[in-house]
């Protein structure tokens, strides 16, 4: 459109880290912008948001000059917040015309994964790497301490011998803590998932 009209038309998204506007008393971790909206993001590596900090962010964002688009403040934590813990923040945000919402890293990953079609291989590889990053950083909730039981046939003996379970990359197991094998009408080989690796062939080498 810019080439066709010889005009500067801001269509794409803008991504910014730790941007402070004039008069702001707090600095949100990230900002996503487009003409129609601004999404401010505050992240915590633990389970709780700092309510006083969120209120300060809401006040600071509300006092900024606006171009007329909607403004959002998204709080991201490891575990889901109790509903009554952020109801007051939602109400306070509405009074100041800022839409506040709380979510988790896991929820964001699940939404992104759901929106990606299977044939989008490159994007799905990127999503898988994002999932591994969240796991390695300890940003997935403790409620993921569950066991996944997979049916296994002739390879069950190899899995037990080498203490290693292999599967298709798109079925990686980093979202469960325990893994077991179902074979011959019984569950065997219950173990804790310590690491998930995705192998790739490069020429004749397996990496």
Image: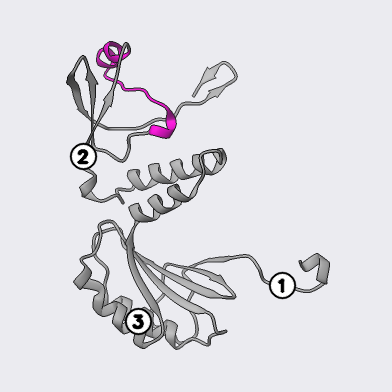
SS under mark 2 = loop
Q: Is residue 169 above or below residue 39?
A: above
* Disc number placed over residue 93 in the picture, else none: 3
Mark 1 touches mark 3? (CB < 8 Å): no
Residue 111 picture location, percent across and down: 41, 53
Residue 198 within the segment the image draws in magenta? no
- The answer to whether 58 appears left or right of 179 in the picture is right
Residue at 82 percent across and 71 percent down: it is 5
SS under mark 1 = loop
| Nearer the observer, 82 or 138 | 82
Residue 158 picture location, percent across and down: 30, 12
Mark 2 to mark 1: distance in Å? 49 Å
Mark 1 to mark 3: distance in Å? 31 Å
Mark 3 to mark 2: distance in Å? 36 Å
Q: Which one is earlier in the sequence, the residue at label 1 or at label 3? A: 1
Q: Is residue 89 above or below residue 42?
A: below
Quarter of the picture containing the N terminus is bottom right
């Amino acid at each position: 459109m810019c080439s066709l009209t010889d005009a500067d038309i801001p269509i794409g998204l803008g991504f910014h880290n730790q941007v402070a506007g004039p008069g702001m008393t707090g600095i949100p971790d990230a900002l996503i912008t487009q003409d129609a909206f601004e999404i401010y993001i505050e992240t915590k590596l633990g389970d709780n948001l700092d309510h006083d900090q969120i209120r300060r962010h809401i006040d600071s964002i509300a006092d900024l000059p606006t171009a007329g688009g909607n403004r959002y403040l998204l709080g991201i934590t490891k575990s889901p917040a109790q509903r009554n813990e952020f109801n007051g923040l939602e109400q306070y945000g509405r009074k100041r015309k800022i839409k506040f919402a709380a979510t988790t890293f896991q929820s964001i990953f699940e939404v992104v994964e759901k929106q990606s079609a299977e044939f989008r291989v490159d994007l799905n590889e990127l999503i898988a790497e994002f999932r591994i990053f969240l796991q390695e950083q300890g940003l997935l909730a403790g409620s993921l301490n569950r066991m996944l039981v997979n049916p296994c046939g002739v390879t069950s003996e190899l899995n037990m011998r080498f203490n290693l379970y292999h599967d298709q990359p798109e079925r990686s197991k980093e979202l469960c803590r325990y893994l077991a094998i179902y074979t011959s009408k019984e569950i065997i080989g219950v173990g804790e998932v310590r690491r998930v690796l995705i192998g790739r062939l490069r020429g004749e080498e397996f990496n």
